[in-house]
Image: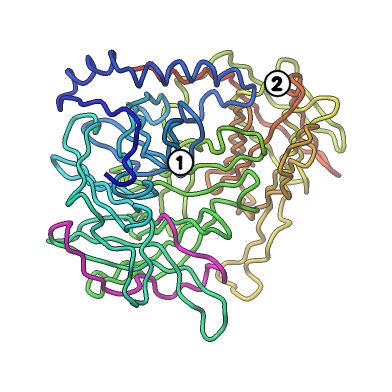
């Protein structure tokens, strides 16, 4: 068959018990385990953020919950046929992932690009982009979603749009009534200029095989930028609204929140969020994969690009994030059982941070850690957290209190001044092959009555900072000095009160079945 993958494909039973027995004898999983041991020698390979078992990894795909387990797929590049396959890991708790064999193989498509899944009662449907031919559908009905069969064995939406005003690219899928619906990622021209804007094109089908094109899906998008496109869409309910997560090849991961007009099958955009707060490729947050959490929220995982030319991983995954929408506000918080990886807890109690004095604490250091910090910032303008610190290397996390946008200048109903959080990685390494990244900077609302709460995850070469469960900033860093583990804090200009600091070392994920 044209473009047929040469990666060994193992055949499995459908029931969980038999599958586990077969997986323990899997030559491919033995290969994965051997490869992981070799790759773990890399000092920048994360401990508890999901990584590929061999070679590089790209977009997260098809996150779903099926028969009591979480499944995450990803673009994998097997060494003997380095074109995208769907790699596959499974977890009981969204953090302790286990390797499974490659799920979807190229053929007749040239490569298996990004896509989403839809969970039905007795099966899971994957819809993804098959390069060179169009959008594909595959189904699996076994317990661990190991065996996949492609519907028709060919594209169900042809890449050749025959002059229609839509593109055929990364799809997602959901069901309403008797019809399946799919979005195909793309863009539309902006007026008479040479610019374009992000767009998603809506299709529907009653059999997964024959798809009817309907229209562009999004209305009232005043949020995305000229030059954005709408790749890797995921459309799900969230609270009393809907969320459309997607990826722009210009400005990276983001989402629109709004209303779904089910009569007209149109999505009306009302708000916008960024998953990336800087440039894309030099260690930025890339494409999402998202699924409902069954409690009104949405779980999303992004891949994060490499920030080093020689990084063979290319991408690692963020921790899973739970998005919820309550009282017209979005909440972003880490999720999954990351607590299961904690050990060696240390705690700092109430401490006065004297103005302009850098403070460090005995035993507070590390480069594979989780840290929760609460600070009373009511009297200060700037808190500076230094992490991964040594004599010549340092990464700075800065919080500027009430130094952001004046949201109420034209809208008295809002009446607030944002704060700003930034991650400055300009001195994070002395290595010469780093893809230098401008400072990551984001606006954040912190109320006068609140403490500043920073939930910081540092994992060798990735930093994620959740701020008051409202925003998250994430970058890749590559300290060259093995002693770059120091942590210190400073309040600029005025005193501040450190209410508490909790820190844990974090264990490695064990990927073996």
Which of the 4 image quarters holds residue 383? top right
Query: Which residue corresponds to the image point at 55% horizontal and 70% vertical from the top-left?
Result: 413
Q: What stretch is highlighted in magenta?
A: 207-232
Asked which secondary structure carries label 1, the reply is strand
In this view, 382 is above or below 328: above
Residue for point 19% across, 41% down = 149
Q: Which mark is residue 365?
A: 2
Q: Residues within 10 Å of mark 2 (few under 14, many from 20)?
A: many
- Determine the main secondary structure of the stretch shown in magenta: loop
Q: Quadrant of the N terminus?
A: top left
Q: Which of 268 and 146 is in front in this view?
A: 146
User: Is 389 situated above or below 122?
Assistant: above
Residue 103: % across, % down: 30, 35
Magenta stretch: includes residue 219: yes
Q: Name the residue under label 1.
A: 321
**Label 1: how many residues lie within 10 Å, few (<14), some (14-19) or many (20+)?**
many
Picture disc at residue 474: none
């Amino acid at each position: 068959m044209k473009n047929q993958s040469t990666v060994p494909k193992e055949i499995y039973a459908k029931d969980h018990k038999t599958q586990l027995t077969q997986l323990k004898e899997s030559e491919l999983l033995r290969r994965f385990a051997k490869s992981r041991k070799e790759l773990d020698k890399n000092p920048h390979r994360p401990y508890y953020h999901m990584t590929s078992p061999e070679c590089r990894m790209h977009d997260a795909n098809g996150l779903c919950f099926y028969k009591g387990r979480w499944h995450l797929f990803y673009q994998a590049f097997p060494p003997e046929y380095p074109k995208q396959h769907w790699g596959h890991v499974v977890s009981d708790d969204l953090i302790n992932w286990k390797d499974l064999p490659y799920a979807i193989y190229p053929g007749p498509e040239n490569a298996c690009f990004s896509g989403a899944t839809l969970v039905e009662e007795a099966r899971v449907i994957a819809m993804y982009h098959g390069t060179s031919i169009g959008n594909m559908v595959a189904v699996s009905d076994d317990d661990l979603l190991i065996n996949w069969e492609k519907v028709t064995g060919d594209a169900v939406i042809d890449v050749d749009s025959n002059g229609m005003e839509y593109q055929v690219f990364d799809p997602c899928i959901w069901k309403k009534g008797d019809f399946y619906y799919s979005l195909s990622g793309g863009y539309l021209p902006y007026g008479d200029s040479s610019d374009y804007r992000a767009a998603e094109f809506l299709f529907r089908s009653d059999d997964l095989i024959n798809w009817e094109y309907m229209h562009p899906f999004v209305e009232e998008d005043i949020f995305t930028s000229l030059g954005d496109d709408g790749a890797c869409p995921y459309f799900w309910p969230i609270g009393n609204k809907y969320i459309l997560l997607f990826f722009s090849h210009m400005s990276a991961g983001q989402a629109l929140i709004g209303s779904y007009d089910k009569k007209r099958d149109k999505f009306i955009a009302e708000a916008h969020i960024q998953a990336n707060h800087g440039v894309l490729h030099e260690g930025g947050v890339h494409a999402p994969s998202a699924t409902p959490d069954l409690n009104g929220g949405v779980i999303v995982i992004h891949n994060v690009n490499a920030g080093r030319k020689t990084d063979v991983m290319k991408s690692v995954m963020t921790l899973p994030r739970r998005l919820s929408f309550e009282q017209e506000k979005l909440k972003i918080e880490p999720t999954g059982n990351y607590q299961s990886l904690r050990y060696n807890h240390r705690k700092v109690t109430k401490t006065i941070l004297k103005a302009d004095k850098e403070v460090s604490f005995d035993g507070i250091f590390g480069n594979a850690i989780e840290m929760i910090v609460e600070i009373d910032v009511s009297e200060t303008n700037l808190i500076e957290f230094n992490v991964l610190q040594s004599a010549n290397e340092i990464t700075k996390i800065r919080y500027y209190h009430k130094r952001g946008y004046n949201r109420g200048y034209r809208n008295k109903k809002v009446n607030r001044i944002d704060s700003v959080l930034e991650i400055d990685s300009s001195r994070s390494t002395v290595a010469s092959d780093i893809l230098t990244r401008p400072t990551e900077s984001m606006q954040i609302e912190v109320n006068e009555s609140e403490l500043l709460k920073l939930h910081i995850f540092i994992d060798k070469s990735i930093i994620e900072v959740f701020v008051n469960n409202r925003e998250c900033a994430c970058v890749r860093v590559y300290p060259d000095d093995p002693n770059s583990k120091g942590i210190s804090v400073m309040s600029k200009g005025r005193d501040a009160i450190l209410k508490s600091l909790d820190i844990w070392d974090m264990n490695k994920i064990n990927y073996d079945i």
